[in-house]
Image: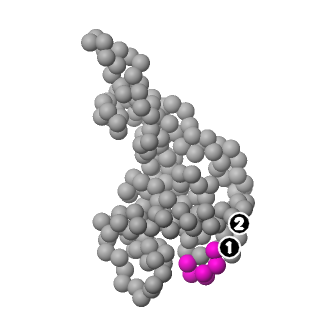
Amino acid sequence: MCSQICASMGDVDDLLAKLKITSCPHCKRTGFLNKHGSLPGYVLNQTGKPVRGARAVRVYCSNRRVALCGQANGCGKTFSVWTADKIKHLFLSANSLWLFLNDSVNSGNKIQAFRNLNCGLGYSSTYHIWRRFRSAQVAVRTALVALCQPPQLESDNPAKLTLDHLAKAFQDHPLSPIAAFAVSLQTFFL
C-alpha cells in the first residue's frame, strides 16, 4: 500500500484541494484522484484522551469513467495521506514516541519511560513498541546515512547511536526528529 506523508493537516488539505491536478502514485495519470474516506482509529483529543477519529485520508484513482477506446482511465488503486505526527499501526504520536525512546535509552528503564508518557496504554505495549524500534533500526540507520554521517560517539548501545544520528540529521527541522524523518523520506519510522 502506498502512502504520502504531509507535515501538517494544512498540507493534507492543500493536497486534497489539488487532487484533480495531482498524478496518481501508482499509474502516474492525472485527473482521476478522488477523496475516498478516511482510515479510522484512535486519536488524542484536546484534553489528551483517546477518542475514535480519522488517522489518515484515503484517496482513490477512479477507473469508473471509460475512455472512447473502451478502457478505464484511472487504475482503481487507493493510497493514504498521513500527517507526520501519526505513526502507522501505533497509537502514540511521533513526539510521544521520540520522548519514550530517548527517555528509555537515557534512563535504561523502559517501563518508567512509558509511565512518564501517561498515554493510557498498557505496560505490555512498552515491549511491543521497543521490539518494533529494534527491528526498524537497520532501515532507519541506512536511510539516515544518505542524509548525513553518523555522529562520532563512544557507545555500544545501538539504540542510542540510532537516536543520536536521527537527532543530528534533523536538528534544524521544526518537527520532532521522527516526524521530520517521515516527511523528508516519505516513509514511516516504524
**Image side of residue 81 versus residue 89, left or right:** left
Position of residue 145 in the picture relative to residue 183 (left or right):
left
Please count the marks in the image.
Answer: 2
For residue 123, the mark is 2
Q: Residue at x 48, y 81 (%)?
A: 157
- Pick the residue in front: 59 or 8: 59
Asked if the stretch drawn in magenta spans residue 109, the answer is: yes
User: Which residue sits at x=35%, y=15%?
Assistant: 66
Q: Callout 2, which amino acid?
A: Tyr
Question: Measured from the top left, where is residue 169 in percent x and y?
Answer: 38, 70
How far across and down, in percent of the image, does residue 44 sit?
A: 66, 52
The label shown at residue 111 is: 1
Magenta portion: prevailing SS class: helix
- Residue 172 visible in image: no
Q: Nearer the viewer, residue 53 or 145?
A: 145
Q: Which corner quadrant holds the N terminus? A: top left
Q: Secondary structure at mark 2?
A: loop
Residue 76 in magenta stretch: no
Q: Which residues are magenta?
A: 105-111
Q: Secondary structure at mark 1?
A: helix
What percent of the width, then of the height, locates residue 179?
48, 59
- Categorize mark 2 by other alpha carbons within 10 Å: few (<14), some (14-19), many (20+): few
Q: Nearer the viewer, residue 46 or 88?
A: 88
Instruction: Tell me where residue 124 appears, x and y as whole percent.
Output: 69, 64
Q: Amino acid at mark 1?
A: Ile
Tell me the CA gap for discs 1 and 2: 7 Å
